[in-house]
């Protein structure tokens, strides 16, 4: 049984994850995956959201969309953003949620999902 504070934190994290996914889908992010790390001891966050875009311009648009929708719907701003305009990878750190937005080649090379293969990994379907 979790405390009221823990329950509230879990709900905030799930709302954050949902807002991130909406932001990615808004700009046609592809192959979106949610990696649930919440049950792994020593994990760096509770969730990772991973997706890819077709060009550096789309990666920037995906980042902007996540920023806007998460700010509007979840009232959160990222603690940091790594990568930038014309980068093949952009990372957004929201504390409990880390977002990775890759070009397909970099996603295949880093294979982040495989690093956390012992976690629960869920593909987000386009029609969800």
Image (cartoon, rainbow, N blue to C red):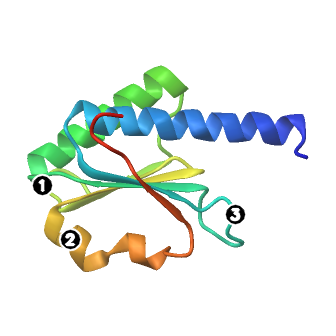
Front in this rendered view, residue 87 or 69? 69
User: Quadrant of the rendered structure where residue 113 is?
Assistant: bottom left
Tell whether 65 sits left or right of 67.
left
Distance Cα–Cα, label 2 vs label 1: 13 Å
Tag 1 or tag 2, which sits nearer the N-term? 1
- Residue 52 in the figure: left or right of residue 10: left
Q: Relative to 51, is 105 above or below?
A: below
Q: Secondary structure at mark 2?
A: helix
> In the rendered image, which residue does mark 1 sit on?
86
Q: Nearer the viewer, residue 64 or 31?
A: 31
Q: Which residue is drawn at the image coordinates 63% and 69% (left, top)?
A: 43
Q: Position of residue 92 (x, y in %)?
A: 40, 51
Quadrant housing the C terminus? top left
**Image quadrant in which you'd find residue 101:** bottom left
Disc 2 designates what residue?
106
Q: Which residue is mark 3?
A: 39
- First of labels 2, 3 by sequence position: 3
The residue lying at 39 percent from left, 39 percent from top is: 21
Q: Residues within 10 Å of mark 3 (few under 14, many from 20)?
A: few
Query: Mark 1 falls on what kind of element?
Result: loop
């Amino acid at each position: 049984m979790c405390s009221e504070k823990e329950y509230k934190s879990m709900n905030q994290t799930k709302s954050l994850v949902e807002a991130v996914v909406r932001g990615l889908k808004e700009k046609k992010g592809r192959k979106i995956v949610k990696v649930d790390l919440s049950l792994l001891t020593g994990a760096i966050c509770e969730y990772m959201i991973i997706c890819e875009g077709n060009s550096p311009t789309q990666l920037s648009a995906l980042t902007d969309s996540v920023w806007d929708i998460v700010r509007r719907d979840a009232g959160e701003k990222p603690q940091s953003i790594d990568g930038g305009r014309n980068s093949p990878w952009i990372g957004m750190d929201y504390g409990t949620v880390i977002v990775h937005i890759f070009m397909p080649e970099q996603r295949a090379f880093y294979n982040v999902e495989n690093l956390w293969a012992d976690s629960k990994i869920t593909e987000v379907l386009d029609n969800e």
